[in-house]
Amino acid sequence: MTESGLKAIFLAHRAQLLRFLTAHGAGDAAEDLLQELWLKIEAAPDGPIGQPLSYLYRAANNLMLDRHRSRQQAAKRDTAWTETITTLPGESDAPSGERVLIAREQLAQALKALDGLGPRAARVFRRYRIDGVAQRDIAQEMGISLSTVESDLRLAYRAMIDLRRRFDEV
């Protein structure tokens, strides 16, 4: 089967495209990029292209840039992740005593705020957010309507948001 149009141009200039990719920094990935370019051509609808060879070079260059950007982003993400979980030799990754005390105090305040909403709203919130029970199941379990469950959750969320704002102000 003979290829026509853009596919024929690609096949006729495959070696030049490969050299182009290699010379412009693709290195060992040049063959992979060329294969990716072929797959894009295969998937593209047939249609007239004014400068098909220029189009292929531009597409090859764009694929190379996309791969480069993707690798840079992956490296940044990996570095950021490593920095967040890496501890220095001799240091513990456990929270400091001060941080533990602050967290306990904030938890006590959150529990107090929930209890201030009343036993039903506090229970609905705990069953939904902590136990992971569906709202409909909570309604059946407690013998209340689904809209009551939703209303109690809104109250609890509002209380938690207000408490969080107070924590952030300090």
Image: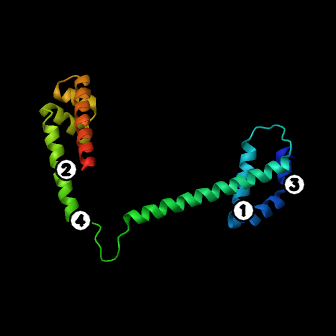
**Which residue bears the numbered disc 2?**
106
Place residue 139 in its image quadrant.
Answer: top left
Mark 4 and mark 3: span between their CA atoms? 66 Å
Relative depth, front residue between 133 and 125: 125
Looking at numbered disc 2 in the image, what kind of residue is underneath it?
Answer: Gln
Place residue 165 in its image quadrant.
Answer: top left
Q: Residue drawn at (85%, 56%), measured in percent from left and top?
A: 13
Asked if the residue at tag 2 contacts the one at tag 4, i.e. Cβ–Cβ closer than 8 Å, the answer is: no
Residue most extreme to the front: 169
Looking at numbered disc 3 in the image, what kind of residue is underneath it?
Answer: Ala
Mark positioned earlier in the residue sequence (1 or 3): 3
Q: Secondary structure at mark 2?
A: helix
Asked if the residue at tag 3 contacts the one at tag 4, i.e. Cβ–Cβ closer than 8 Å, the answer is: no
Mark 3 or mark 2, whichever is nearer to me: 2
Place residue 21 in its image quadrant.
Answer: bottom right
Mark positioned earlier in the residue sequence (4 or 2): 4
Q: Residues within 10 Å of mark 4 (few under 14, many from 20)?
A: few
Relative depth, front residue between 44 and 165: 165
Q: Exactly how many numbered labels are in the figure?
A: 4
Q: Residues within 10 Å of mark 2 (few under 14, many from 20)?
A: some
Mark 2 and mark 1: span between their CA atoms? 55 Å
Residue 166 spot, x, y in % from top left: 23, 44
Looking at numbered disc 4 in the image, what kind of residue is underneath it?
Answer: Ser
Q: Please, is residue 107 above or below residue 96 in the view?
A: above
Q: Residues within 10 Å of mark 1 (few under 14, many from 20)?
A: many
Q: Secondary structure at mark 4?
A: loop
Q: Which mark is residue 96?
A: 4
Mark 4 and mark 2: span between their CA atoms? 15 Å
Residue 71 shown left or right of residue 2 in the figure: left
